[in-house]
């Protein structure tokens, strides 16, 4: 199964199987379960290439990520294997079927209900193992005179550009610097951490920025971005802050608020509830978010009095010192 997000469905499936997930929380929940072998990310070296009788592909949010999932499915399938594609209409399942037909000689819709469709493809073309080098891309972002080369992979947030929220956050960090060491929560491709270190170097200072992210592509991209920039810090997978052991003078973040195509602020709410214990006394949280999101109250409750340090028509940057 590629892209599974709801593990409750596994109770209805018998036999040995693998779950390929780019979500570290799902990966952790399946680790040690015995029956299901979890694989973290599309490029996990343990991928059982050429061995699967059936591969189930769940629709992702990004079209480019669908291409990656279908490419992986073709590499995992044994000869005469079957590929099952399922998703919601609003996720683009209809247009995805066109791509499915390009790799299979026999495609048919086998079920449809609750605005979802299930398609079955047989005689899928066998494909070779995946190489991350074939999918990795690069782009350059610049702010406050500091340029950073940023790695990209299908499905990563803001691939190919610097999103406006992060740009506003960087501007606030140039105007009101934070002390180190720093943790970049939901670090994505490592833009904030690499830029912060470049900006500090221009000021004649040294800064270390660790990063944590729940998504496999983000972890890989952040490591590649740091490597090219010569940046320092540990990039780790993590679902929230549960696996973070250090304490920091500052935590910076542009946290996600989507799960697939739906708004979902639960991850950020959990993060805010945990953030203070990872800040040193007087340590600072610097967070950017869409203005409509209800984070100020949570910051006040869990970290300290929230102060607006930057704002535009869409985004607000908050700062709060630990109680």
Image (tube, rainbow, N blue to C red):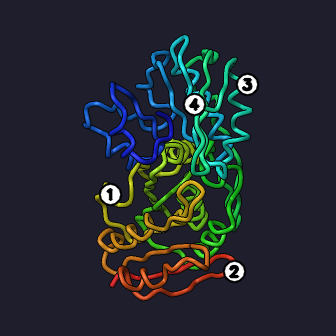
Q: Is there any visible trace of residue 153 in the rendered image?
A: no
- Residue drawn where x is 43% and y is 81% of the image: 299
Which badge, 2 or 1, comes first in the chain's sequence? Answer: 1
Q: CA distance from mark 1 to mark 3?
A: 44 Å
Which residue is under mark 2? Answer: 312
In the image, taking residue 163 as reference, residue 233 lies left or right, namely left
Question: Depth check: 71 or 164 in front?
Answer: 71
According to the picture, the residue beneath numbered tag 1 turns out to be 244
Q: Secondary structure at mark 1?
A: loop
Label 4 SS? helix
Q: Nearer the viewer, residue 103 or 44?
A: 103
In the rendered structure, which disc, 2 or 3, sits on the residue that comes first in sequence?
3
Instruction: Name the residue tied to disc 4.
Output: 132
**Residue 48: quadrant of the picture:** top left
Q: Nearer the viewer, mark 4 or mark 3?
A: 3
Which of pointers 1 and 3 lies earlier in the amino acid sequence?
3
Determine the image quadrant of residue 31: top left
Q: Position of residue 289 (x, y in %)?
A: 57, 73
Residue 106 placement, left or right of 242: right
Distance between mark 2 and mark 3 Cα atoms: 44 Å
| The quadrant where residue 262 appears | bottom right
Sooner in the amino-acid sequence: mark 4 or mark 3: 3
Sequence-wise, the earlier of marks 2 and 4 is: 4
The image position of residue 39, as x and y in percent, is: 41, 34
Q: Could you tell me which secondary element the residue under label 3 belongs to?
A: helix
Give the spatial CA distance, label 4 vs label 3: 22 Å
CA neighbours of label 1 inside 10 A, class few (<14), some (14 to 19), many (20+): some
State the image coordinates of residue 75 (x, y, percent, origin top left).
56, 21
Q: CA distance from mark 2 to mark 1?
A: 32 Å
Residue under label 3:
102
Check the image and report above or below for 10 versus 82: below
Q: Label 2: state its secondary structure.
A: loop
């Amino acid at each position: 199964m590629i892209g599974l997000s709801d593990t409750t469905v596994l109770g209805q499936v018998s036999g040995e199987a693998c779950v390929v997930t780019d979500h570290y929380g799902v990966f952790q929940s399946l680790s040690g379960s015995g029956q299901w072998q979890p694989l973290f990310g599309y490029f996990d070296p343990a991928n059982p290439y050429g061995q699967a009788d059936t591969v189930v592909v769940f629709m992702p949010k990004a079209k480019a990520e669908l291409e990656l999932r279908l490419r992986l499915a073709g590499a995992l399938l044994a000869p005469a294997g079957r590929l099952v594609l399922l998703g919601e209409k609003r996720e683009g399942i209809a247009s995805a079927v066109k791509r499915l037909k390009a790799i299979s000689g026999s495609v048919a819709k086998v079920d449809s209900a609750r605005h979802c469709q299930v398609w079955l493809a047989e005689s899928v073309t066998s494909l070779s193992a995946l190489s991350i080098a074939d999918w990795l891309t690069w782009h350059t972002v610049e702010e406050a005179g500091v340029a950073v080369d940023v790695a990209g992979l299908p499905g990563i947030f803001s691939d190919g550009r610097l999103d406006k929220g992060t740009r506003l956050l960087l501007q606030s960090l140039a105007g009101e610097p934070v002390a180190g060491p720093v943790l970049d929560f939901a670090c994505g491709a490592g833009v904030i951490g690499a830029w912060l270190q470049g900006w500090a170097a221009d000021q004649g200072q040294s800064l270390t920025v660790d990063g944590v992210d729940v998504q496999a592509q983000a972890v890989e991209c952040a490591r590649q971005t740091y490597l090219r920039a010569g940046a320092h810090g540990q990039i780790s997978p993590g679902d929230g802050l549960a696996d973070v052991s250090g304490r920091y003078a500052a935590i910076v973040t542009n946290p996600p608020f989507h799960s697939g195509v739906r708004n979902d602020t639960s991850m950020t709410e959990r993060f805010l509830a945990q953030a203070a214990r990872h800040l040193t006394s007087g340590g600072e949280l610097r967070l950017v978010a869409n203005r409509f999101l209800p984070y100020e109250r949570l910051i006040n409750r869990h970290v300290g009095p929230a102060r607006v340090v930057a704002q535009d028509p869409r985004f607000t940057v908050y700062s709060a010192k630990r109680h």
